[in-house]
Image (cartoon, grey):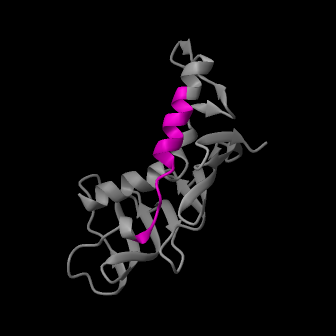
Amino acid sequence: MKTSILTAALILLSGCAVENFDNGIPVKTGQRTLSTGATNAMSAMLVRNSCRKVEAANYPLPAGTPDGAFTSQRNPNGTYYRTVARNGYASQYVETHHANGKIRARVELGADGLAQGWSPAYNEQGQPTTRMEYRNGYPVRSQAYNAAGQIERDNYIDCAKGTITPAR
């Protein structure tokens, strides 16, 4: 259960929150184009969901886990995660893996236990899909890649203001 929650958190916090927008411009969903009002409402919701503080305290490990390298048991879908255990929590990084062993997402944790720097996410073939930049545990920028591996969307996230704005 904890592994499932951790995996879901890492995927959400690895840039998936901007998948419905092209630099703030509404995109087609099915056969309908979203209105500006709907886009703004969805953007606000996505910012709220993305702006959760990412810190070691969010990742408790199973009771009795000794300090040092830790690999979780596989979920029913075959995914698992790795980290360095310290005092019962993840430290240094949290890295989730696809069932085939390739990295799914990685979040670096600073000495203070807060997410810092770029957090990349990859598909099962190992190609980059998204990445989030963190400062003091909060996302400040997100990027999404197309199938060719080029940046398709690049956005700044301001959690205090609750906004997502194009970086380019």
Toward the bottom, the furthest residue is: 67
Please state which of residues 10 and 165 is positioned toward the viewer in this rendering. Answer: 165
Residue 61 x, y percent position in the rendering: 29, 72
Question: Residue at the spot x=37%, y=64% of the render?
Answer: 58
Taking the magenta stretch, the answer to whether it contains residue 52 is yes
Vertical placement of residue 133 versus 70, above or below: above
Which corner quadrant holds the C terminus?
A: top right
Q: Quadrant of residue 72?
A: bottom left
Question: Residue at the spot x=53%, y=67% of the render?
Answer: 115
Using residue 3 as the reference point, say whether residue 131 is left or right of it: right
Question: Residue at the spot x=57%, y=66% of the render?
Answer: 136
Vertical placement of residue 65 versus 119, above or below: below
Question: Residue at the spot x=44%, y=56% of the render?
Answer: 10
Q: Which residues are magenta?
A: 41-56
Q: Decide if residue 146 is in sight here.
A: no
The main secondary structure of the magenta stretch is helix
